[in-house]
Amino acid sequence: MKKEHPSVAMFKDDPVRPENYRRFERDVPEWFTDAKLGVFVHWGPYSVPAWAEPIGELGTIEKQYWFAHNPYAEWYYNTIRIEDSPAAEHQREVYGGAPYDDFIDQWDPAEFDPDEFLALVKSTGAGYFVPTTKHHDGVTLWDAPGTDGRNTVARGPKRDLIGAFEKATRDAGLRFGVYYSGGLDWHFSQLPPITDEGQEFGRPVDAAYAEYAYDHVVDLIDRYSPDVLWGDIEWPDAGKPSGAFSMENLFEKFYAARPDGVANDRWGETHWDFRTSEYQNGTSVEGTGAWENCRGIGYSFGHNTQEDERHLLSGPAAVASFVDIVSRGGNLLLNVGLTARGTVPDLQRRTLEHLAAWNAVNGDAVFGSRPLDASIAAPADEPWLRWTRTGSTANAFVDAVGDVRLPGVSDAVDAASARLADGTPLTVGRDGDALVATLAEPAVAGPVLVRFDLAG
């Protein structure tokens, strides 16, 4: 049986904004709806051990089993504190049971080239980029206030990594976002490890942490003026009511700095511009309003040396996932787990390069598109078929070759107008509510794009 993970489970399917947050409700900016693809990066001291058990995707694993065998390498700090977990054993055997914070000083991103990396991000067609600024381990990737040197400027990398990301992102012409873990900070809160063995999901809720987190997010807004404010897990309860260090004040500052900025829904049921799902978890929010699915190329967000081709999305699989999400009205936030040295792991790079190659051929039927009404043409799984709409054009994505039959296509779709991505005419016949065609193997593996004019 599938179990909700706390990163998503805290948010009801239909939450109601508190009265003091309703003034922030508005239409989602067109740029976000048009972008379709964003690239996420998880990078931190956990990238040094880069170790987790690749047990499967979130949303498919019992949570009682999940935490002690967590496939998220970025949760290493929590997992090694769970007695007798394989990660704790690994930490003892490989690092002699050394404290987690040793990894901060061992983190040396000597090969990090933000411009080269953002060139790769841009090549995929992504419209925005979101790095982690502070994950649950509490280590900030900039010299955040109140961290007493527990950040990447004072230790380890000796660099403002968020500043480097922000400049490279702007130089590449992309929108810049910031991820911030407001719900968890294992260092600040000193709470016991999360095991889910009958305990409540422990998170700091007090005023001291609310003020600490508030100061961090204000600093991120003031320094980097992000276009996307991406929270995680929750927000300390003490910071939700109106007041000097409230989430309400943060949204005021954010929208003053970026009137067309967007915020996700993991700020503790305060305000959101778009909803989020994660891998196969929390998918009930998909399909209505603005939404985004986030996932790693593998089972982990942080770099995990235990993953191989069996655990990662291939290039064609990433394309199919992307097209499916867009056809249903969502965005994909696809994560890269950089190595401690600052490089993209080879298998992840291969997936991104394939996605880039496919989008270079077919992307103008994806980016800026809208879902096609199913009464005009319906999706199918035999053969795999998804649709988008760009103006008066219906775009069919068919993951099949040879003789294919596309079911559920109304007369509003003009079969005689069929053409391939490059404009080459394609002979397509009609058999009742189905279209029939012969499709050749595409030059770039993945769904074949066939365009049709729409009547009227």
Image: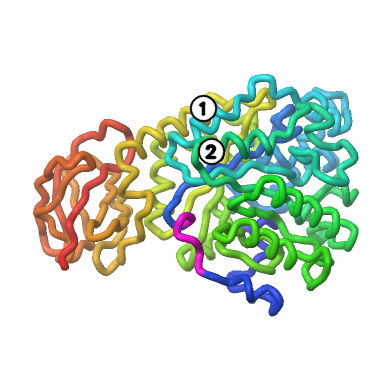
- Res. 431 mark: none
Q: Residue furthest top?
A: 110
**SS at circle 1:** helix
Q: Residues within 10 Å of mark 1 (few under 14, many from 20)?
A: some
Identity of the residue drawn at 47% across and 43% down: 126
- x and y, in percent, of residue 181 in the image: 73, 51
Kind of residue at badge 2: Ile
Q: Quadrant of residue 24?
A: bottom right
Does label 2 or label 1 sit earlier along the sequence?
2
Query: Pointer 2: what residue?
Result: 297
- x and y, in percent, of residue 104 in the image: 81, 30
Is there CB contact under 8 Å for labels 2 and 1? yes
Q: Quadrant of residue 109?
A: top right
Q: CA distance from mark 2 to mark 1?
A: 9 Å
Q: Is residue 330 visible?
A: no
**In this rendering, is residue 270 above or below 63?**
below
Q: In the picture, which quadrant includes the C terminus?
A: bottom left
Indicate left or right for 132 with 57 as reference: right
Identity of the residue drawn at 16% across and 46% down: 419
Identity of the residue drawn at 52% across and 55% down: 292
Query: Pointer 1: what residue?
Result: 347
Please say whether residue 28 is one of the residues in the magenta stretch: yes
Q: How many marks?
A: 2
Image coloring type = rainbow
Kind of residue at badge 1: Leu
Chain part drawn in magenta: 27-32
Q: In the picture, which quadrant includes the N terminus?
A: bottom right
